[in-house]
Image (spheres, rainbow, N blue to C red):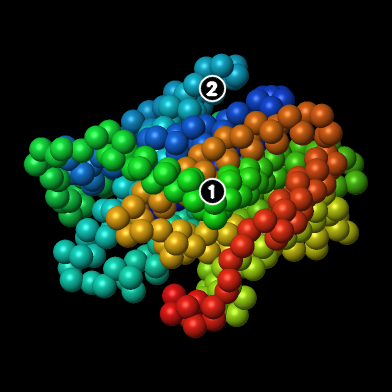
Amino acid sequence: MNFLQYFIWGSWLISLGAYLGGTLRFTGLQIGSFFATMGIASLFMPAVMGIIADRWIPAQKLLGICHIVGAAFLVAAAPQHEYGPLYGLILCSVMFYMPTIALSNSVAYNALEMKGYDTVKTFPPIRVWGTVGFICAMIAVDLLGFDSSAGQLYVAAAAALVLGVYSFTLPPCAVDRTPRRQSWVDSLGLRAFALFKERKMAIFFIFSMMLGMSLQITNAYANDYLTNFFGNDPLYKGTFGVEHANILISLSQASETLCILLIPFFLRRFGIKNVMLISMLAWVLRFGLLGAGNPGGGVWMLILSMIVYGVAFDFFNISGSLYVEKETDPSIRSSAQGVFMIMTNGFGAFVGSYAAGAVVDSFGWPDSWFVFAGYSLLVAVVFLLVFRYKHTPETAAAK
C-alpha cells in the first residue's frame, strides 16, 4: 500500500514541471500555480476527509474512493493542452490525493494494531517503502520517456486505480457514528490556532510558513531546469543530467531516507533550534548548488545539491514536529500538528509556488536559483536572531 501510495505522487510531482515548461510552454508563474494546488488542498481537504473517515465511511473504503476519483481526474487531465482545463483537472486530482496521505497512515496503523504489532517500531520500516515507491516511479517515468509528456499522468492514474481497488480489500477501520456535541471549530482542529497568541509559537509557525515556501520550488522547476534550460544548450545536450533528469533528482529522495537516521544524533547534540537552522542553511546550499552547477563538468555540484536536500527537508519537518509535540498541551497536540502542516504545506507551499513562478519569469535561469538561495539565507539569519529556544541535552536525549 505505501509503495503505491507514493508511486502515484512520484510519477508526476518531479517531472510535471518539465512537461509544462518544455512541451506546453507554460510560463514560470503558470507552472508555479500547478504546484500551489497542493497548498490549496492541504488547507482543508485532509481535515474534511478525516472527519468523514472517523464518522461515516471507513478509512480504507474512503482511501479507495479518493484514489479512484483522483485517477479519473488524471486521465481526464492527460489530453489537455490549454492552461485552464489542465489546471482545473490537476487541482481536482490533488484535492483527492492529498487526504490519502493521512488516510493511508490511519489504515496502516489500524492493520498493525489488529495484528498486535507495536506501531512505533513497525510502521517506520513500512513507511520507507513509500519513499522506495516514489523513487521507482521517478525512474520508471524517466526510462519510459514520459518525463516530458502526458504519459506520466497516465502512469499515476494506473497506479491510483490499482491502489483504489486494492484498498477495499484492506482490514476494516472502525467508524464512530455516536452523535457528538462539537463545534465545527473543534471538528476541524481550528482551536489550535489560538497558539498564535503565544509569542514563541507564533514566531515558530510564521517561520514554518516562510520555510514552507521553499518546499515546492525544486519539485516544480528542477526537472524543467535540467531538461529544458540545459537541454537547449549544445554544450550539455545529450548529457546524463539532461537526458535522465528524473533519475538524477531521485538522489534527493534517497538522501531524504538516509538523513532521517541522522536526526536523533543531531537533536541530542545540537538541539531543536540548531537542527532547524541547519535545515535552513541546507536550503541555501540546495538552491545555490543548483544555480552554480551544470550537467557537464559541474555535475558534482548538482549531485551535492541532491544529497543536501535530505538535510534541508527532513531536519526542519521532523524537528519542527517534535517542537510542536513538546511545546503544546496534550489536549490540542494533534490539532497543533495540523496547524504546523497547514503553515508549511498549505500556506507556505501556496505562497511559495506563486512567488517562485514570478521570480523565474523575472530573473530566468540560473539567476533564479541564487534569488531562492538569498531568500533562504535571509530566513536563516532572521530565525537565528528572533527564535528563542534553550537546548537541554537530557531532554533531547529523552526524545
Question: Residue at the location (54% across, 37% down)?
Answer: 347
Of the 4 image quadrants, the one containing the N terminus is bottom left
In the picture of the structure, the residue carrying the numbered disc 1 is 202
146 left or right, relative to 193: right
In the picture of the structure, the residue carrying the numbered disc 2 is 86
The reply to whether residue 7 is visible in this rendering is: no
Q: What residue type is labelled 1?
A: Ala
Q: Is mark 2 on a helix, strand or loop?
A: helix
Q: Where does residue 159 sit, x and y in percent of width and height?
A: 40, 43
147 left or right, relative to 334: right
Q: Where does residue 204 sit, x and y in percent of width and height?
A: 56, 53
Q: Where does residue 101 sit, x and y in percent of width and height?
A: 39, 48
Front residue of 53 and 8:
53
Question: Residue at the location (13% across, 45% down)?
Answer: 176
Front residue of 384 and 69:
384
251 left or right, relative to 177: right
Can you say whether 206 is above or below 359 in the image? below
Quarter holding residue 390: bottom right
Of the 4 image quadrants, the one containing the C terminus is bottom left
